[in-house]
Amino acid sequence: MILPSMARALLPLLIRNLAILTDLVVPLACAGCGGRGASVCPACAAELRGPAFLAAAGPMATPRRRGLPPCLAVARYGGRVRSLLLAYKERGRVDAARPLGGALARAIARALPAAPGAPAEASVTPAPLPACLLVPVPSTAAARRRRGFDHLAVLCSAAATVLRRHGHRVHVAPILRPVRRLADQAGLGVAARAANLAGAFELAKPARVGRRAPLPAGARVIVVDDVLTTGATLAEAVRALRAACVRTTAVAVVAVTDPTRGRAALPAIHGPPG
């Protein structure tokens, strides 16, 4: 339908305008630490500017995470990063979407081919980069009503804006949906999270992907969430895509809870964009 499509397109603009209006009425305070003077202060923003690193892969991953494609993140979930994400998701601090989206863009970029630089000769045209589809983990209708917005859709939009500036062909593709009611994941253990999410998602628009309408040749499909904990949510999203014959290239998150306590640190992987 045309109207819902227009509403999705106008949502980022509406959110930005509301954030500007709020700044005029309410004294600005950092969404992470509460300090005055900026929506996200330099100290909190610095916590999101680390290089992308491999958050879950092979023997360094916890057992629940080993079935995932490569998972990339830019921060550990804790301290200022945790405060920023909670303020953004649960306290309506949509003004934090831009720095969080920038962090997410760096994680996504590590799974994509490098954007071409200037050609060596004027007559040489660089080959176009393959298309990239960002597939956000779907939120339940209840969560969207409680928050007043789809937090992952807005984060993906912010990340896509950054990636396009660096030459990537990126599209946000909200093609997954919940098929049943889910319990709140907060407070659930590893086994309970996996059971809660088993078979929970399906393709929302099967006619647009998979066998009926193949993805563009070489397209990269990146499943996106804000935080990686046990990996159950991301694993279910990957399974639902696989059931529709869509291969996931990687998964990307802003932050990851530490699965390596007592082990060697995971290797850092540097990559654009800044």
Image: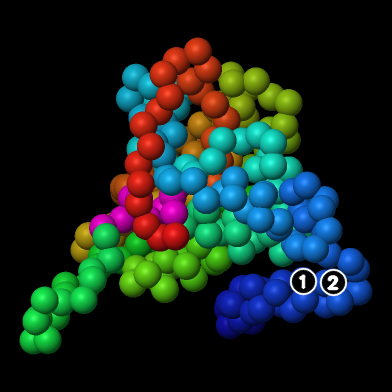
| Amino acid beneath label 2 | Thr
Q: Are marks 1 and 2 in contact (CB under 8 Å)?
A: yes
In the image: residue 79, left or right of residue 76: right
Question: What element does badge 1 sit on?
Answer: helix
- For this orientation, the residue located farthest to the bottom is 123
Whether 26 is drawn above or below 244: the answer is below
**In front of the other: 269 or 243:** 269
Q: Which residue is mark 2?
A: 22
Residues drawn in magenta: 106-113
Q: Residue 190, image x and y in percent?
A: 59, 21
Residue under the image location 49 percent in, 39 percent down: 234
Q: Can the viewer see residue 67 in this picture?
A: no
Residue under the image location 47 percent in, 67 percent down: 162
Locate residue 16: give its quadrant.
bottom right
Residue under the image location 21 percent in, 76 percent down: 118
In the image: residue 204, left or right of residue 130: right
In the image: residue 13, left or right of residue 124: right
Whether 183 is drawn above or below 93: the answer is above
Q: Characterize the local packing of mark 1: few (<14), some (14-19) or many (20 or more) Cα atoms within 10 angstroms.
A: some
Q: Is residue 2 magenta?
A: no
Question: What element does badge 2 sit on?
Answer: helix
**Measured Cα–Cα span from mark 1 to mark 2:** 5 Å
Q: Which residue is mark 1?
A: 19
Q: Residue 65, image x and y in percent?
A: 44, 27
Q: Characterize the local packing of mark 2: few (<14), some (14-19) or many (20 or more) Cα atoms within 10 angstroms.
A: few
| Amino acid beneath label 1 | Ala
- For the N terminus, the image quarter is bottom right
**In front of the other: 184 or 182:** 184
